[in-house]
Amino acid sequence: MDEFKRYAVYYAPAPGPFAEFCAQWLGWDAFEGIELPHPALEGLPAPIREITEAPRKYGFHGTLKPPFRLTGTRAELMADLAGFAAAHKPIEMEGLALTRIGGFLALTPMGDLTPLEVLAGEIVATLDPHRAQPSETELARRRSAGLSERQNALLTQWGYPYVMEEFKFHLTLTGKLSIEEAETVKAALGPVLAPLLPTPFRIEDLCLFGEAEDGRFHLLHRYTLSG
């Protein structure tokens, strides 16, 4: 029996100060599979544990193929992901910016995003044979968010509404906040995070994550983009 409920393909930074701080910020190290103490940071509107509760279980990441239940075996998925990574080159953008997206904060890439968008779309399509179809309950939950006609079509085809031309790459840092709270967190977090942000921002590998029975995501393997 598989120990993971769902799988996903994410970007996650290689070990180093940037990855370490962001894992501590969220309070979850997806590679080691352990909770971490949050950093001491002044000027926040609430404890970090509350601010980061929603994204914590996923680990620090940027989604490339959203979580899906597996049809077939993990070995087959891993073989196809390894083959995909071996056929594709790393991609590079100018850097990352701390951005408020509606009611949450995330890091978003700067520069020409076309190669990233193409890569993500190819990952979604290439690995789709490994995705089990979502239940009607899952589909109804997604549709309750008020999807556009195109987003609903993407949900039907790919199991998720925010893929292909609706894809917006981001690395989530908080749960939903009021605009005032988000701006307060941004002002406190920005100066600490700024010297750690990679310039340029490169995606050099693809990370396979698995969701354990407790809902926490674990980094299972990195596949180098070596094409």
Image (cartoon, grey):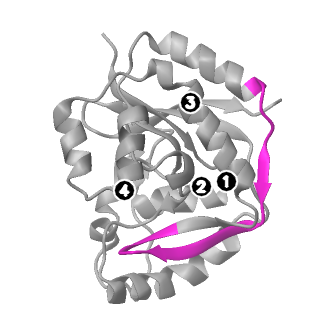
Residue 225: x, y in percent?
A: 75, 34
Which quadrant would the N terminus be assigned to in this image? Answer: top left
Which quadrant would the C terminus be assigned to in this image? Answer: top right
Mark seen at residue 55: 4
Q: What element carries label 3?
A: helix
Which numbered disc, 3 or 2, marks the residue closer to the eye?
A: 3
Q: Which amino acid does label 3 sit on?
A: Ala
Residue bearing the label numbered 2: 19
Q: Is residue 194 left or right of residue 179?
A: right
> Closer to the N terminus: mark 4 or mark 1?
1
Q: What element carries label 1?
A: loop
Q: Is residue 3 left or right of residue 170?
A: left
3D distance between C-alphas at marks 3 and 2: 28 Å
In the figure, residue 124 lies in which quadrant?
top right
In contact (CB < 8 Å): disc 2 and disc 1: yes
Q: Relative to residue 117, is residue 21 depicted above or below?
A: below
> Closer to the N terminus: mark 3 or mark 2?
2
In the figure, residue 180 lies in which quadrant?
bottom left
Q: Is the magenta stretch mostly helix, strand or loop?
A: strand
3D distance between C-alphas at marks 4 and 1: 20 Å
Q: Give the class, few, some or many, for how many residues have Cα within 10 Å of label 1's Cα (few <14, many ≥20).
A: few
> Closer to the N terminus: mark 2 or mark 4?
2
Identified at 56% across, 51% down, the residue is 165
Residue 95: x, y in percent?
A: 72, 66
3D distance between C-alphas at marks 2 and 4: 15 Å
Q: Give the class, few, some or many, for how many residues have Cα within 10 Å of label 3's Cα (few <14, many ≥20).
A: some
> Closer to the N terminus: mark 1 or mark 3?
1
Q: Is mark 4 on a helix, strand or loop?
A: helix
3D distance between C-alphas at marks 1 and 3: 31 Å
* Residue range (magenta): 86-106
Residue bearing the label numbered 3: 125
